[in-house]
Amino acid sequence: MTHPFVLLKWLIAKLHFGFSAEMLEQHGFFQHVTHTWLVMAILIGVGLLATHRAGLVPGGMQNFMELVLVEIRGMVRDTMGPKGMVYFPLIATLALFLLVSNLIGLIPGFAPPTASLNTNAALAVGVFLVTHIVGVREHGIRYFKHFMGPVWWLTPLILPIELIGHLARPLSLSLRLFGNMYGHEIVLMIFFSLVPLLLPIPMMLMGILVAFIQTFVFMLLSMIYIAGALEEAH
């Protein structure tokens, strides 16, 4: 989806980086990539602010980030157990990136990277790979035994079901996030074009709620998939 006005595209054209607005439109302006870089820059900046002059008595940004990370760590511990704490940095990174990516689309002139299926598919495939790498690392070659069912003569029935179920995970992760964020972007643009003032405010509030819920769903499913690979049953 192309925004009617995207600030980064306008800046690139104005600063004359060898591109004109027409060239960007003609050859495709990969706004999900440039906005992903922007989100990464924001997160790095927030991280530097939080750790700059960090002290025993936190204040300002350090206090805020500690509060956020403590909440995420609690969710990881409750969902994945003590063994899952190793993957807290991965889950926290996913949560912060997704939340900022979702919220940045609510600012006029910016587009959420998560409204692109490419961004979401990259994240979902990453979670898929981590899940099975964790399974193999924890259980060795025995990890693949659960794909074959509890008894050998059920293997022809269980194996296709298990394979389809596991391959559907990145598909559902990416499509769910894409559908919600893309749909909200369309609704928001329609309301802005019809009634620029007042009416979009409830939609903006709903957008904040959608951003948090979709971040939580993606994070929760990722934790459940990885925790499943850690279980002894595998």
Image: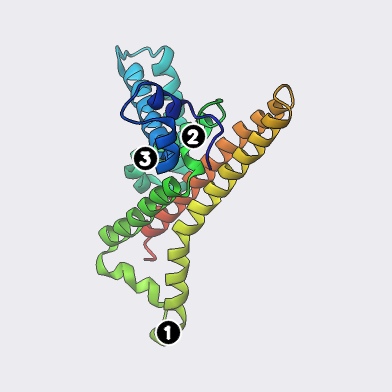
Which is more toward the observer, 71 or 184? 184
Left or right of 4 on screen, residue 165 = left
| Residue in the foreground of this view, choosing between 8 and 174 | 8
Residue 6 in sight here:
yes
> What secondary structure is found at the residue carrying circle 1?
helix
Dot 2 lies on which element? helix
Q: Residue at x 44, y 34 (%)?
A: 22
**Quarter of the figure with residue 135:** bottom left
**Residue matched to label 2:** 99
Q: CA distance from mark 2 to mark 1?
A: 42 Å
User: Would residue 73 be visible to someone looking at this image?
Assistant: no
**Residue of label 3:** 88
146 relative position to 201: left or right:
left
Q: Residues within 10 Å of mark 1 (few under 14, many from 20)?
A: few
Q: Which residue is denoted by mark 1 in the rendering?
A: 156
Q: Which label sits in the foreground, 3 or 2?
A: 2
- Upstream in sequence: badge 2 or badge 1: 2
Query: Residue at position x 42%, y 17% from top?
Result: 63
The amino acid at mark 3 is Phe
